[in-house]
Structures are given as C-alpha cells and as structure tokens.
Image (spheres, helix red, strand yellow):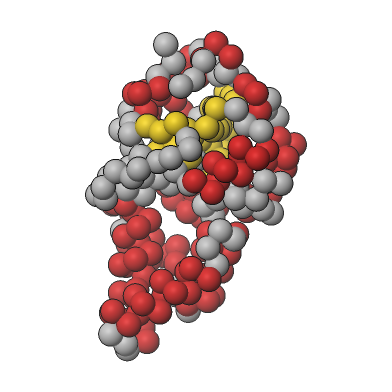
C-alpha cells in the first residue's frame, strides 16, 4: 500500500481520521438540534430536519466547517456547545503509535484539517496529539477547503512537500479526489471514521480500518 522508503511527508486529516468522527456526528446531528429546539421552542425532530437541510446547503465550503459562521447563522454559541460534549472526543486506535513510528523514521507528520481553529484547539487540548505531530495546518488560514484542488498549492507554499513522496490519509472521498487531481501519489481512505457506525465500502482508493495496518516497516 505504501513504499515507506520513498516517503518524506505524511499528511493527516483530523476528524474521522486521527480522531473518531462520533463526536462530530453526535454534536451536529443531535446536540446542536437539541439546543436549537430549546432556544426556539420547536420540536426536536423539526429542529433536526431544518438544521440538516441548512448544513447540506453549505457542504464542502469553508462556511460548512466554520464555528463562527454557524454561531451567527443559528444564534447559538457553537464553541461553548462543543465544550458541553467534549468528553466524546476520542483518538482513533493506534494513532499515537503510528505518528511516533513515522517521525522516528525522519518522516514529517503534518495535520491538515478543514476544522475551524477553535475546534482544532479544543481537540488538541483534549487529546494532546499536537506533541506527536510536526505541524498543524488549518484550511481556514489558507482560504480554501481541502475539497478544492487549488488548496494543495497553498498548502505547499506554507508546508512544502513533494507529491510523489507524500502520503495523505483522510476519511473524505472528495478530499482524496482533490488530492489525486493535484498529484499526491499515496492516498489512503478510512473505512470507519465513526466507530459507532458500520464500516464503509470504499472504491477507488486504498483503505484502512486502523493505523496499525500501515505502520512503517
């Protein structure tokens, strides 16, 4: 799957890749609708239906990932609501061992996330994963989401990497397609981003369940 002798850089998504997506799934599908229903005195199911439709209208854009945008859009303090359920934040299996093994080989490990900076800060504080990474890059700081192929040029300007000698691990198929268009050679999908949901069927990309499947040999 990966010829580690050729690898110089590993780019890693956060939510659904290094971290269990259950926190985010629960937060946006259950917790936010619950608080929205309470604030506007509507039924929880009505709130859920309304919010899921509003989410979809911004899917794949920077706004979709922006906590400040949704705080204003919904009239809720989204960062505070995240803190209410932060106990659900969890690291995926074998992630720390994988990161340490990669860096021990002299390979640069870089977190590249669409998550908003406030969400990134909360999750790094909760998991302490920052100490196992060489750099953290947030797409909001670059002005484009990872789904846009032009994102990778902007990333390369601030965090130089050779696409032919780079691994990207991400749970998002549109992001992997974007990276493929740019020319990143080694692309790995995640089969079970949310450990509470069934494993997915992935076509068109190599895929793993847990990181011990691609430890550097």
Q: Please state the horizontal and vertical placement of residue 39, each as a whole percent of the image.
A: 36, 83
- Number of dots carrying numbers: 0
In this orientation, which residue lies closer to the viewer: 200 or 159? 200
Question: Residue 110 occupies which quadrant of the picture?
Answer: top right
Task: Reply above or below: 12 against 76.
Answer: above
In the drawing, does residue 64 fall left or right of residue 211?
right
Q: Please state the horizontal and vertical placement of residue 191, each as a whole percent of the image.
A: 35, 39
Whether residue 130 is visible:
no
Outermost residue, bottom direction? 41
In the drawing, does residue 197 fall left or right of residue 12?
left
In the drawing, does residue 193 fall left or right of residue 169?
left
In this orientation, which residue lies closer to the viewer: 63 or 80? 63
Whether residue 212 is visible:
yes
| Image point (60%, 27%), residue name | 185
| Image point (44%, 50%), residue name | 122
In this orientation, which residue lies closer to the viewer: 184 or 10? 184
For the C terminus, give its image quadrant.
Answer: top left
Q: Please state the horizontal and vertical placement of residue 216, each as a whole percent of the image.
A: 44, 15
């Amino acid at each position: 799957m990966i010829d580690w002798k050729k690898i110089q850089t590993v780019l890693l998504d956060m939510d659904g890749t290094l971290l269990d997506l259950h926190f985010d799934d629960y937060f946006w599908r259950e917790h936010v609708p619950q608080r929205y229903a309470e604030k506007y005195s509507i039924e929880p199911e009505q709130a859920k239906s309304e919010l899921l439709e509003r989410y979809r209208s911004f899917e794949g854009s920077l706004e979709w990932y922006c906590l400040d945008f949704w705080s204003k859009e919904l009239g809720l303090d989204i960062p505070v609501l995240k803190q209410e359920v932060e106990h659900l934040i969890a690291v995926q299996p074998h992630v720390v061992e994988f990161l340490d093994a990669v860096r021990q080989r002299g390979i640069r490990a870089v977190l590249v996330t669409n998550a908003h900076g406030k969400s990134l800060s909360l999750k790094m504080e909760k998991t302490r994963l920052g100490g196992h990474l060489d750099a953290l890059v947030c797409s909001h700081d670059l002005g484009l989401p990872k789904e846009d192929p032009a994102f990778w040029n902007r990333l390369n300007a601030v965090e130089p990497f050779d696409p032919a000698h780079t691994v990207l691990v991400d749970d998002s198929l549109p992001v992997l397609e974007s990276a493929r268009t740019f020319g990143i050679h080694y692309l790995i999908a995640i089969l079970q981003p949310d450990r509470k949901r069934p494993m997915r069927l992935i076509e068109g990309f190599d895929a793993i369940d847990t990181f011990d499947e691609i430890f550097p040999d």
